[in-house]
């Protein structure tokens, strides 16, 4: 049975960033519970990826299951055009309460990428509403990742976002150098960033970045000071500041939102990934009243977006339950616990051959190699050590569920070291 299923999968289904002609191996999952996956071979590895950073409370959580079941009895979905419902309203209220001061308006999107598209469109419509229709480009930094749809690809790192393959199709934006490493001096970077903003100001609608930690673009933590520089540059040149908190939101880096660590208030903020605790696809764009009403002054008069599954009630209900779980615990102390557990154990990798760098920020632990990871060998080694890892490029990393015990964090760290030696 397992081999039949896997065989059909191999011949017909794409997995993320894979080839139909030369498919990469995949493993059959039959269930998931707590922080563990259940594989068809009977093994139960700890999921050090939290299903791409989203399953912060672990799998099969009774409170999240109950929220989904209860909502199912009312309705799984209704259109959001002309209709509304309590789950969306309550979730909107929660997000406005939790978000940095002043973000008061909410657009629910169906994935992180779509929320970034909406944020970019908001910025453009806002500039048109302000009588600056020529401002259609974005200022960002190298090394970023904002999603895979076309608007998003344009603001991803040019290499990681494959700008050359899609030239002529993906919009061309303005890229500043990657921010310095956490702990390094920001003066030189700030000067370069300011100079670019000055040079292109008449063409720029907004600055868009992942605050504090670049995720899929390279797991790169950078100084909070850079965000304060961006805020002041944005103010000086009438640019909006869009913070993409899809990876960092809901505590991952140690504050509820990464922006909180810098004391910076964005004009527009995107959240996704952990929003539903890894249950359903949902994202949200929050913005200030200035942006919300400013974009109404554009010729359309309305925000030009409206997904079919906008504000899906099931997803909103689970998101509410997930935020309840998060905010009724001392999540900050918990992230600190994980961080302090990861740090010394991953530091041990520094001595291993092939290791270029080790970095930890909040509940994010990264080992960077001096070569591309042999993903198959590294994944196999980690599974033998009881852990599911998904390395990419030269990075072996973990963004574990917040519910991992100390012992489970230790298991993850030793599996990462095994993966380093294998990959
Ligand atoms: C994952 C991610 C996205 C894209 O979200 P999807 O739900 O995969 O479309 C955008 N920005 C950041 C920072 C992300 O980590």
Image (cartoon, helix red, strand yellow):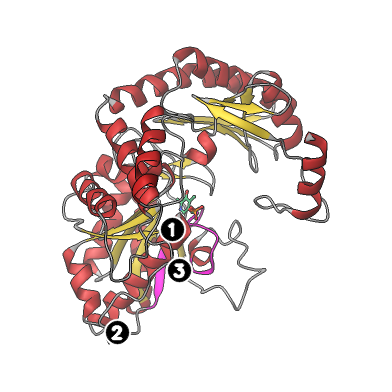
The furthest residue to the front: 73
CB at disc 1 and ligand 1 closer than 8 Å: no
Indicate the secondary structure of the residue bearing disc 1.
loop
Q: Residue at x 35, y 52 (%)?
A: 313
Query: What residue span does the magenta drawing correspond to?
Result: 136-151
> In the picture, which quadrant includes the C terminus?
top right
How far from the left and from the top, in percent, is residue 161? 58, 60
Q: CA distance from mark 2 to mark 3?
A: 27 Å
Which sits earlier in the primary sequence, circle 2 or circle 1? Answer: 1
Rendered residue at 49%/45% (across/down): 215
Does the image show residue 12?
yes
The residue wearing badge 2 is 300
Of pointers 3 and 1, the one earlier in the residue sequence = 1
Label 1: which residue? Answer: 110
| Image-quadrant location for residue 312 | bottom left
Q: Nearer the viewer, residue 408 or 226?
A: 408
For mark 3, what is the residue? 174
């Amino acid at each position: 049975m397992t081999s039949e299923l896997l065989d059909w999968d191999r011949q017909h289904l794409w997995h993320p960033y894979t080839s139909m002609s030369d498919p990469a191996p995949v493993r059959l999952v039959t269930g998931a519970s707590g922080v563990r996956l259940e594989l068809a071979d009977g093994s139960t590895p700890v999921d050090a990826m939290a299903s791409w950073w989203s399953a912060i409370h672990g799998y099969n959580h009774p409170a999240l299951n109950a929220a989904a079941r209860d909502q199912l009895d009312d309705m799984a979905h209704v259109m959001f055009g002309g209709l509304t419902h309590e789950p969306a309203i309550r979730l909107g209220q929660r997000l406005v309460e939790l978000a940095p001061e002043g973000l008061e308006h909410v657009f629910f999107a169906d994935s992180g990428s779509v929320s970034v598209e909406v944020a970019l469109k908001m910025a453009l419509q806002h500039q048109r509403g302000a009588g600056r229709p020529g401002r259609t480009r974005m200022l960002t930094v190298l090394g970023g990742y904002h999603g895979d749809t076309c608007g998003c690809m344009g603001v991803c790192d040019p290499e990681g976002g494959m700008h050359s393959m899609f030239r002529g199709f993906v919009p061309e934006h303005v890229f500043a150098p990657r921010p310095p490493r956490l702990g390094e001096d920001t003066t030189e970077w700030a000067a370069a960033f300011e100079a670019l903003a000055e040079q292109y100001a008449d063409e720029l609608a907004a600055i868009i970045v992942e605050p504090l930690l670049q995720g899929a673009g390279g797991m790169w933590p950078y100084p909070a000071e850079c965000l304060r520089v961006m805020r002041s540059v944005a103010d000086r040149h009438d640019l909006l500041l869009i913070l993409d908190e899809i990876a960092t939101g809901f505590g991952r880096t140690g504050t509820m939102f990464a922006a909180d660590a810098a004391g910076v208030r964005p004009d527009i903020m995107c959240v996704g990934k952990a929003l539903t605790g890894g249950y359903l696809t949902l994202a949200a764009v929050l913005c200030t009243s200035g942006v919300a009403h400013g974009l109404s002054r554009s010729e359309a008069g309305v925000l030009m977006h409206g997904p079919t599954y906008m504000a899906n009630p099931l997803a909103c209900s689970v998101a509410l339950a997930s935020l309840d779980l998060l905010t009724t615990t001392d999540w900050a102390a918990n992230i600190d616990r994980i961080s302090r557990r990861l740090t010394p154990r991953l530091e041990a990798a520094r001595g291993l051959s092939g290791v270029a760098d080790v970095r930890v920020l909040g509940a994010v632990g990264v080992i960077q190699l001096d070569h591309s990871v042999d993903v198959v060998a590294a994944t196999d080694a980690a599974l033998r050590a009881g852990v599911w890892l998904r390395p990419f490029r030269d990075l072996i990393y973990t963004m574990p569920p917040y519910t991992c015990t100390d012992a489970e964090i230790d298991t993850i760290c030793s599996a990462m070291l095994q993966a380093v030696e294998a990959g």
